[in-house]
Amino acid sequence: MILSLAKKVASKAAVTVQSAMVLRRAGLVGRPDESIRSLLAVHKVGPFAGAISIGAQRDAGAVAIVDEIGELTYGQIDRRSNALARALSQRGVGSGTVVAALCRDHRGLVTMMAATGKLGARLLLLNTGFAKPQLADVARREQVSLLIYDQEFTGLLDAVDPSVERCLAWVDDEPPIGADTLDALIAGTADRPMPSPDRPGGFILLTSGTTGTPKGAPREKTSPLSSAQLLDRVPLRPDQPMHMAAPMFHGTGLSQVLLAFALGNTVVLRRRFDPEETLRVVAEHRCAVLVVVPTMLQRIIDLGPEVLGKYDTSSL
């Protein structure tokens, strides 16, 4: 029995050492002091908010995201998420609160992801293709307290219980009179760091819903070593700009953007997928990484040689 236990301990130790070596080669683990700060940040606020905070400490001026509005640095996102976390805390959002996001990929969603982590809240990532009945069922079942949404989805919100608070994350036109917006909350609140929550926040991803209403699948804090298996197969490295074409409510998109932020890389976001626009973004920003789901890749291929040849994608 003792021999068997010793073998198990030795096996786990070997896996841990191997994983740590993979993370170090990828640039995810640096000097011992940096590694300790990273582990503490993840322990306090979870991997997403932790990656943003560490990125701000490493190089506050490094560009974290580029969306249709422009660039935001790691320092700016860190401060914006501090302010948003403080504003939401004043509205009763805290550890364990479920906040839902019905958003496309943009700065508002990224800021909310970091802010909920800093509050210990759980962020439910909703599929932007939901119909009213699905949205209503999921919001009720997951006990959503606050819904952030893009203005284009306003027509779906009357299906949600009126007691659920609402806040606009992306405004196409003028916001309705009296409507809360993330930008207004951020601008009107101090951006000092919040006290660490009792426990870090997490994400709730939804199943495909092939057998009924999509079910929530919580993604709580995980060990940094869990990234090693992916990094051992997909050679993501620092200083590799990424174009996130896949939606971040999808597990693929969420995992890849998290790794990009952990590496301190720039992520280029677009709210809607267009195959030729994707090629243009890759060429303009010299992206080394393109994250798509299979149907997106097929649409790019279907553009044909003439269109594909117009763009220099050799950086990939």
Image (cartoon, rainbow, N blue to C red):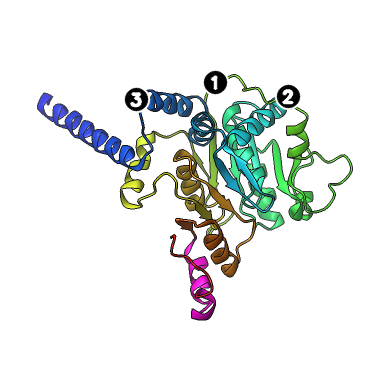
Mark number, residue 90: 2
The 10 Å Cα crowd at callout 1, few under 14, some 14 to 19, many 20 or more, is few
Residue 104 placed where, x, y %?
64, 52
Which of pointers 2 and 1 lies earlier in the amino acid sequence?
2
6 is higher (above) or lower (below) than 253: above
Q: Nearer the viewer, residue 40 or 29?
A: 29
Circle 1 sits in a helix, a strand or a loop, which is it? loop
Label 3 packing within 10 angstroms: few (<14), some (14-19), many (20+): few
Amino acid type indicated by mark 3: Pro
Report which residue position mark 1 lands on: 198
Residue 182 belongs to magenta span? no
**Residue 91 as seen in the image, left or right of residue 305:** right
Residue at 65%, 22% in the rendered image: 192
Name the amino acid, label 2.
Answer: Gln
Q: Position of residue 202 (x, y in %)?
A: 53, 35
The CA distance from mark 1 to mark 3 is 26 Å
Quarter the N terminus occupies: top left
What residue is disc 3 on? Answer: 32
Is label 2 or label 3 in front? 3
One can see residue 214 in this view: no
Residue 82 seen in this snapshot: yes
**Residue 28 picture location, percent across and down:** 38, 37
Horizontal side of residue 185 vs 243, given as left or right: right
Amino acid at dot 1: Asp
Magenta region = 292-308
Residue 292 in the image, given as x and y percentages of width and height: 49, 60
